[in-house]
Image (spheres, helix red, strand yellow):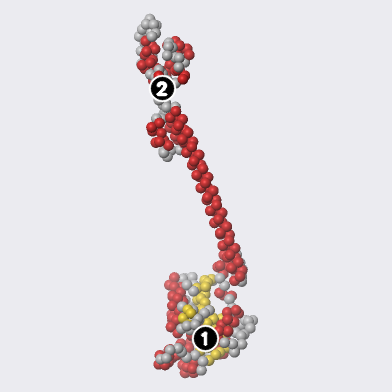
């Protein structure tokens, strides 16, 4: 969109280039785009936008592109005001006279002439008559007077435009007026330097940047550059912190895995977990605390006390212990034997004197 700013219920559009495509200047203002923008405001922002300002500093150009803008202005339900901020020549002048209210800078210049370009005189005459009717309906001029001024290629000052109803009000400024003998392109360059910018400043942008509404273009660019630099700095900091955080997470995961491996290896050594199934515990999604609690509840596998193939060092030399030896020296081992190795325990009991425990029942550990 070509909308420069929407502020205080007013949308502003700029026509600060030639209109349409000019051979040696390339594409300028696209009339269809301006027309679409005016219609877009009417369709979507009529409750917010109460006025559209079209500001003009143009040498003119394509009649087709210009008429698209003229039609959009005349058919807009939102009032459209035009401002001649420097020059309004040819088709740009036709656009300028179509505003509901028409303003002109005191140093501005205006030019109207017949349509030109191409070799078909009949078509050119038809277009000239069409443009003359637009002048007639939007100024104090009669149709014949319009045609006369257009045929002579008439150049006018702001005061002359005011006297003919081409503009409704002259905006007084302290800007210097350019010499009238300057070329069209020289005037265009001059006006672009001295043009009134009060209503076209990007107030929302300056507010966002915490600048005054009168901030220069250089100040705005500097503030935007500073914000870009700050954003780049923050992005670099975030990236560095993310890398550090990922490294810490990876280190923590490795430490947790090491603790888990040690926990499971100890459980295997204690006989709480079979070595063949330890992989199940290693790949478990349970936390180390949960695994420790679970493993702690598992009953260690019992190795028969007299299994020579798995005999622990602690029982070497106990093969000939009697029931009394076990009771005296290792009552805990005697209890484990009773609970986990009934064969060995029964054999130990069987060696007791029959008169000491004639009816001993190893299953119940009771005498009758």
Q: Read off the residue under disc 2.
A: 310
Comparing labels 1 and 2, the label whose residue is closer to the camera: 2
Q: Residue at image x 42%, y 91%? A: 119
Q: CA distance from mark 1 to mark 2?
A: 110 Å
- Give the image location of residue 122, x and y in percent: 40, 92
- Give the image location of residue 67, x and y in percent: 44, 83
Nearer-the-camera pick, 333 or 160 = 333
Nearer-the-camera pick, 98 or 239 = 239
Q: Mark 2 Cα within 10 Å, few/some/many (few <14, many 20+)?
A: few
Q: Quadrant of residue 85?
A: bottom right
Tag shown at residue 89: 1
- Give the image location of residue 63, x and y in percent: 45, 84
Residue farthest along the front direction in this orientation: 309
Tag shown at residue 68: none
The C terminus lies in quadrant? top left
Position above or below: 353 against 194: above
Position above or below: 24 against 205: below
């Amino acid at each position: 969109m070509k909308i420069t700013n929407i502020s205080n219920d007013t949308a502003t559009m700029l026509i600060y280039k030639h209109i349409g495509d000019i051979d040696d200047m390339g594409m300028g203002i696209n009339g269809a785009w301006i027309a679409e923008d005016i219609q877009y405001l009417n369709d979507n922002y009529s409750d917010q936008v109460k006025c559209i300002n079209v500001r003009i500093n143009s040498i003119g150009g394509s009649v087709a592109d210009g008429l698209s803008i003229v039609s959009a202005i005349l058919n807009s339900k939102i009032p459209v005001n035009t401002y001649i901020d420097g020059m309004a020549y040819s088709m740009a002048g036709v656009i300028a006279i179509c505003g509901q209210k028409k303003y002109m800078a005191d140093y501005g210049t205006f030019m109207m002439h017949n349509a030109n370009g191409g070799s078909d005189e009949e078509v050119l005459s038809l277009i000239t008559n069409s443009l003359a009717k637009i002048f007639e309906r939007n100024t104090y001029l009669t149709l014949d007077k319009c045609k006369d001024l257009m045929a002579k290629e008439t150049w006018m000052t702001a005061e002359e435009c005011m006297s003919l109803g081409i503009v409704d009000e002259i905006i007084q400024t302290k800007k210097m007026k350019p010499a009238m003998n300057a070329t069209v392109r020289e005037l265009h360059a001059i006006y672009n330097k001295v043009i009134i910018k009060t209503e076209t400043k990007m107030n929302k942008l300056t507010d966002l940047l915490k600048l005054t509404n009168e901030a220069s273009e250089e100040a705005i660019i500097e503030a935007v550059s500073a914000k870009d630099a700050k954003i780049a700095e923050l992005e670099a900091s975030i990236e560095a912190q993310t890398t550090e955080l990922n490294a810490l997470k990876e280190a923590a995961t490795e430490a947790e895995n090491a603790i888990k491996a040690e926990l499971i290896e100890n459980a295997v050594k204690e006989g709480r977990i079979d070595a063949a199934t330890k992989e199940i515990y290693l790949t478990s999604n349970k936390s180390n605390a949960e695994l420790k609690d679970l493993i702690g509840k598992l009953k260690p596998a019992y190795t028969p006390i007299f299994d020579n193939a798995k005999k622990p060092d602690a029982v070497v030399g106990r093969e000939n212990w009697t029931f009394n030896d076990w009771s005296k020296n290792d009552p805990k081992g005697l209890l484990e034997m009773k609970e986990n190795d009934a064969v060995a325990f029964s054999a130990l009991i069987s060696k007791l004197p029959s008169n000491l425990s004639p009816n001993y029942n190893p299953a119940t550990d009771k005498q009758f």
